[in-house]
């Protein structure tokens, strides 16, 4: 609709000033936005922006020009799309006609789960990198965020017609694995580790680091183990594989519990081992690499990005070098854009990576590599709060949320059939929505009551609203769904709800353009609130005028569909009953 309005405006400018239209439209960037209530569905500042650009002004003032434009546009629009096109204080306000509003219902019922799809990506290949755990390391709360945000962005970009794939970029390479190997060889016991691999391996890792303080020689031994691994030593290779397998068992649990898609590609850090030398050559050839105190660096001072170490003084490769190889490899796979869902503490590292890629000529536009730098998720009770006195990790949070969700369901609807399934769906909704309803950039403090509440701006509230509509629809079964009369008169609240449903595709575009799922969640919350006012204001099952009743049933059917589609993009299921 926004594009259509822009077109109407351009057309009107051409009619008003055929000689200057081209230049004026080329130099003035006007916008079409959502005005405050009472000023129509869309408003444009075109008159004010364009007025300044004319050599021969077409009206006495921008305010007068707005009137002229509004008149001209009204002549063009067949009268079907807008009920009014009005100039007000230099703005042009557009109000959708009832016909267009009612038409939304057939669009939704035809498109169903596809309603809202937009063609932003035009089939372009895009990669979303998210949920990048490190082997043998416990998953912390930050990993929950990347899993949740990344999974949602994946779905949103896919819905916006990008050809989307995901990658985990598993952390499985670096000297720390040499240390871990050494510790395992010294003190490890297969049977104990098998029971609870990540916890036990992490214990070994903590222990070796403690012992290094007294005996620095151990560090050298650890490094040597890593070198052996790099050189393909069979014992170390086998051990490293085993660590990886054990770790995946646990990461798998997170995928299952959270209901996050498994990654399409598994190109871990180790995958780039043999791809790094070529990058070094390329950097040398472009004269970007300089030697500094034995290390090989790229100097990025002039960009305010300090010094980037590519190869360490001991010859060891760096995380940064792997990241350079990663981007280049993925670009070679045809990904025209790469989205990194990585916490904001890695802002500097990725900024350096992207700058070097730009200097190499591999990255030609800032839109090709995007860092979705999310903030910290913490708990109000602080970090040290499991019974064992250790950090609360991803697994603990999920488990506790699951217990609480079940408690709530038991309390609210003890008769419910599939309580276990539903409570899992509620747990996911609570965690995911809490995260996704905030701007990803913000640091957030997880509040149990707020996340799990069935009221307010929460995931369970949206699920509940959806289930409530389904309840009404179950009772309405058998009432015929006739064709809606396009000329029926609509109540204000009905219009309000339809106007909201009509905006859904534009909300998807905005979300995909800014990588901000919170735009969808805010939209869904507002939609639910409008639905609840609607439900209080007008009868549905008790309505005696069958045409009106029929319209209302279709309005709520459409509302439920849009709620489902939106929740689905946030990775949240919408149970039929709860
Ligand atoms: N494995 C890292 C971590 O857990 C995140 C990886 C970020 N991705 C990247 N391409 N550097 O902190």
Image (cartoon, rainbow, N blue to C red):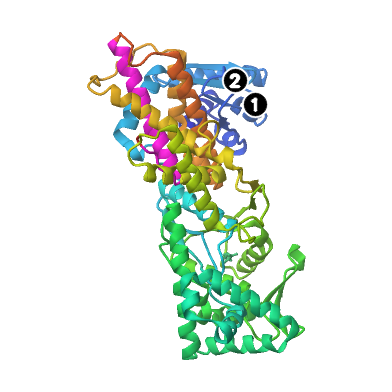
In magenta stretch: residue 565:
yes
- Residue 318 can be seen, yes or no: yes
Which element type, helix, strand or loop, lies under badge 1? helix
Query: Please, what secondary structure does the residue beneath circle 2 have?
Result: helix
Q: Disc 1, disc 2: CB below 8 Å? A: yes
The numbered disc on residue 48 is 1
The quadrant where residue 392 appears: bottom right
x 58%, y 25%: residue: 35
Main SS, magenta region, reads: helix
Viewer-side residue, 319 vs 215: 215
* Magenta range: 546-575
Label 1 packing within 10 angstroms: few (<14), some (14-19), many (20+) = many
Which residue does the numbered mark 2 point to in the structure image? 66
The N terminus lies in quadrant: top left
Label 1, label 2: how far apart the Cα atoms are: 8 Å
The answer to which image quadrant residue 323 occupies is: bottom right
Is-magenta flag for residue 258? no
Q: Local crowd at mark 2 within 10 Å, few (<14), some, or many (≥20)? A: many
Residue plotted at (42% across, 66% down):
265
Instruction: Establish if 17 lies above or below 126.
Output: above
Q: Position of residue 350 (x, y in %)?
A: 63, 63
Label 1 C-beta lies within 8 Å of the nearest ligand 1 atom: no
The relative height of residue 289 versus residue 423 in the rendered view (above or below) is: below
Query: Considering only order in the chain, which callout, 2 or 1, is on the residue closer to the N terminus?
Result: 1
Tag of residue 308: none
Q: Please provide percent x and percent y for residue 91.
A: 61, 22
Residue 474, x across and y down, in percent: 29, 26
Cβ of disc 2 within 8 Å of ligand 1? no
Residue 21 appears in which quarter of the rendering?
top right
Residue at 43 percent across and 19 percent down: it is 535
Q: Is residue 437 left or right of residue 262?
A: right
């Amino acid at each position: 609709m926004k594009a259509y309005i822009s077109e109407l405006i351009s057309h009107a400018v051409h009619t008003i000033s055929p000689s200057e239209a081209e230049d004026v439209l080329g130099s003035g960037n006007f916008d079409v936005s959502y005005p405050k209530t009472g000023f129509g569905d869309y408003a444009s500042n075109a008159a004010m922006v364009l007025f300044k650009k004319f050599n021969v002004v077409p009206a006495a003032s921008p305010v007068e020009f707005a009137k002229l434009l509004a008149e001209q546009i009204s002549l063009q629009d067949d009268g079907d799309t807008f009920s009014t096109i009005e100039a007000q204080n230099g703005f042009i306000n557009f109000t959708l006609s009832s016909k267009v509003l009612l038409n939304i219902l057939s669009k939704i019922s035809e498109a169903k789960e596809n309603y809202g799809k937009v063609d932003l990506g035009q089939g372009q290949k895009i990669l979303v990198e998210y949920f990048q755990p490190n082997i043998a390391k416990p998953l912390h709360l930050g990993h929950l965020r990347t899993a949740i945000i990344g999974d949602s962005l994946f779905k949103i970009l896919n819905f916006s017609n990008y050809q989307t794939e995901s990658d985990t970029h598993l952390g499985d390479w670096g000297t720390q694995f040499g240390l871990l190997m050494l510790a395992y060889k010294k003190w490890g016991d297969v049977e104990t580790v098998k029971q609870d691999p990540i916890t036990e391996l992490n214990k070994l890792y903590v222990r070796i680091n403690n012992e290094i303080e007294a005996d620095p020689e151990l560090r050298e031994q650890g490094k040597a183990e890593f070198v052996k691994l790099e050189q393909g030593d069979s014992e170390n290779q086998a051990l490293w594989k085993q660590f990886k397998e054990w770790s995946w068992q646990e990461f798998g649990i997170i995928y299952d519990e959270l209901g996050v898609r498994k990654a399409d590609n598994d190109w871990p850090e180790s995958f780039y081992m043999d791809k790094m030398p070529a990058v070094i050559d390329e950097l040398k050839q472009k004269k970007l690499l300089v030697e500094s105190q034995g290390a090989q660096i790229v100097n990025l001072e002039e960009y305010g990005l300090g010094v980037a170490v590519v190869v360490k003084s001991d010859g060891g490769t760096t995380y940064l070098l792997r990241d350079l190889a990663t981007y280049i490899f993925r670009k070679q796979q045809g990904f025209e854009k790469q989205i990194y869902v990585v916490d904001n503490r890695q802002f500097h590292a990725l900024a350096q990576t992207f700058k070097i890629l730009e200097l190499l000529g591999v990255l030609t536009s800032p839109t090709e590599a995007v860092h979705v730098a999310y903030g910290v998720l913490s708990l109000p009770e602080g970090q040290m709060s499991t019974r064992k006195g250790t950090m609360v990790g991803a697994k603990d949070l999920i488990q506790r949320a699951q217990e609480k969700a079940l408690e709530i369901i038991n309390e609210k609807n003890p008769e419910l059939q599939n309580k276990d399934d539903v409570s899992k769906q509620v747990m996911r909704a609570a965690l995911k929505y809490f995260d996704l309803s905030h701007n990803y950039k913000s640091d957030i403090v997880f509040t149990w009551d707020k996340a799990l509440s069935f009221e307010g701006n929460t995931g369970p509230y949206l699920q509940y609203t959806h289930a409530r509509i389904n309840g009404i629809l179950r009772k309405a079964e058998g009432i015929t769904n006739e064709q809606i009369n396009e000329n029926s008169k609509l109540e204000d609240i009905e219009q309000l709800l339809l106007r909201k449903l009509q905006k859904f595709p534009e909300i998807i575009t905005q979300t995909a353009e800014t990588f901000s799922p919170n735009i969808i969640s805010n939209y869904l919350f507002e939609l639910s609130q409008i639905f609840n006012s609607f439900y209080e204001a007008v009868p549905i099952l008790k309505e005696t005028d069958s045409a009106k009743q029929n319209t209302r049933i279709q309005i709520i059917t459409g509302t439920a569909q849009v709620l489902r589609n939106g929740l689905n993009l946030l990775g949240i299921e919408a149970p039929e009953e709860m």
